[in-house]
Image (spheres, helix red, strand yellow):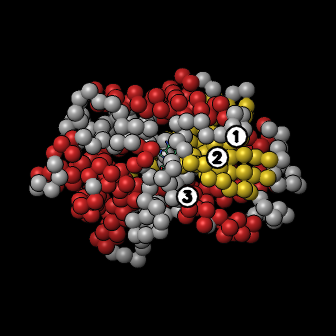
Amino acid sequence: MDVAQALHMNGGDGDYSYSNNSLLQRKVISMTKPIIDDALTNLYSALNFPKTLIMADLGCSSGPNTLLVASELVKSVDKIRQKFGNDESPEIQIYLNDLPQNDFNTIFLSVSKFRKNLSNQMVSNNSSSPCYISGVPGSFYTRLFLRKSIHFVYSSYSLMWLSQVPEMIDINKGNIYMSTTSPPSVIKAYREQFQKDFSMFLKCRADEMVSEGRMVLTILGRQSDDPCSKECCYIWDLLATSLKDMVAEGLIEEEKLDSFNIPQYTPSPKEVRNEVEKEGSFVIDRLEVSEVNWDASTGNNLNLSEEEDVQGYNMGKCMRAVSEPLVLSHFGESTIDEVFKRYAENIKSSMSREKTKLINVTVSVTRKG
Ligand SMILES: C[S@@+](CC[C@H](N)C(=O)[O-])C[C@H]1O[C@@H](n2cnc3c(N)ncnc32)[C@H](O)[C@@H]1O
């Protein structure tokens, strides 16, 4: 599988689009806002109140979350500027990066509305163009920007995606991700791919960032040291169960299932720390773990069973928005609706049985001088 081609969130604004099914990720962005504010405050004073700031959101996707991040960054800088008693707003350039298959058009179509809304919300609206938005297609595992040009890098729920499916010497039979039944060589391949990718990411950003630049990364991760722990693998186990049932019913070939592996790795805080320290260009300012429930739905005024129904369905749609292009590229069009119907049912039934949550690992770092 060519991950850079196959991996993207569902575009547009349809029923299964990322745009309409990314409430959970939006909650995570909001939860980490204090860490962003802290990093920006330290950046702004360390750089002696610069007149221009260049920022990047890596793995921005498309939909409300993309421009939410951009607007939070601009508003945060404006508040910090006020706090330090500076009269002049810095001009801000925000680069929105994602893989080339991302729906950049949907973002670009909403930029003028975003700028209008933003200038109404600013503490001061003395600046007619507070920020400039550009799209940057390409993998964040490669260089994306000019050397020493970026002041602030942000990324949320993107760095758990690997650059490729790990090369495996054994078949990950009956699984599509790391699992308690995966051979040790499969777990090792996943771990090594993460280490290789994350250190390449840090090396590229180290080249691109100015000294004293700040970077805040939130990665879907785990608390446990065990890469097969339920907290990170369960969500993919439920997709594997749907696929296995379809193999048993003769709807999908067994070899197709055995050759499909999700290009994702959910690291522990310890693994994130190790890679940052090994690469050596950044100092860790904060490293925090948080949780978000699968039931990010805002549904209220519902009785319990209806609520579970809506929540299960929403998480099913969220996972479809995230993984449909990958699953489609491997299994084809003919089975896709059935796969995701079963996956949503499995999610719904597990949510009715137990409290299910995802773990977020957030690291805030400074580029060494
Ligand atoms: C779950 S979405 C998160 C989007 C957004 N940051 C949010 O929090 O809602 C993950 C995004 O990371 C992007 N992504 C994954 N690997 C990438 C890579 N190597 N380079 C750039 N973007 C990547 C995906 O295409 C996807 O749009």
Q: Which residue position holds label 3?
A: 104
Residue 66 screen position, x and y as percent: 57, 57
**Residue neighbourhood size for the residue with mark 1, other residues' Cα within 10 Å, grouped as few (<14), some (14–19), many (≥20):** many
**Residue type marked 2:** Ala
Say whether residue 335 is visible. yes
Q: Which residue is drawn at 77% across and 43% down?
A: 44
Q: Which residue position holds label 2?
A: 56
Q: In this view, does 79 lie to the left or right of 361?
A: right
Q: Is residue 338 above or below residue 259?
A: below
* Secondary element at tag 3: helix
Q: Nearer the viewer, mark 3 or mark 2?
A: 3
Q: Is residue 119 above or below residue 287?
A: below
Q: How far apart are marks 3 and 2 (CA)?
A: 15 Å
Q: Earlier in the sequence, mark 3 or mark 1?
A: 3
Quadrant containing the N terminus in the rendered view: top left
Quadrant containing the C terminus in the rendered view: top right
Q: Is residue 128 left or right of residue 19?
A: right
Q: How far apart are marks 3 and 1 (CA)?
A: 21 Å
Residue 317 screen position, x and y as percent: 36, 63
Q: How far apart are marks 1 and 2 (CA)?
A: 7 Å
Judged from this view, the residue extending furthest toward the left is 249
**Residue neighbourhood size for the residue with mark 2, other residues' Cα within 10 Å, grouped as few (<14), some (14–19), many (≥20):** many
Q: Which residue is drawn at 21% across and 41% down?
A: 258
* Secondary element at tag 1: strand
Q: Residue at x 43, y 59 (%)?
A: 10
Q: Residue 95 carries which label?
A: none
Residues at circles 3 and 2 in contact by the CB criterion of under 8 Å: no
Q: Which residue is drawn at 60% across and 23% down?
A: 280
Q: Is mark 3 within 8 Å of ligand 1?
A: no
Q: Earlier in the sequence, mark 3 or mark 2?
A: 2
Q: Which of marks 1 and 2 is nearer the N terminus?
A: 2
Q: Which residue position holds label 1?
A: 150
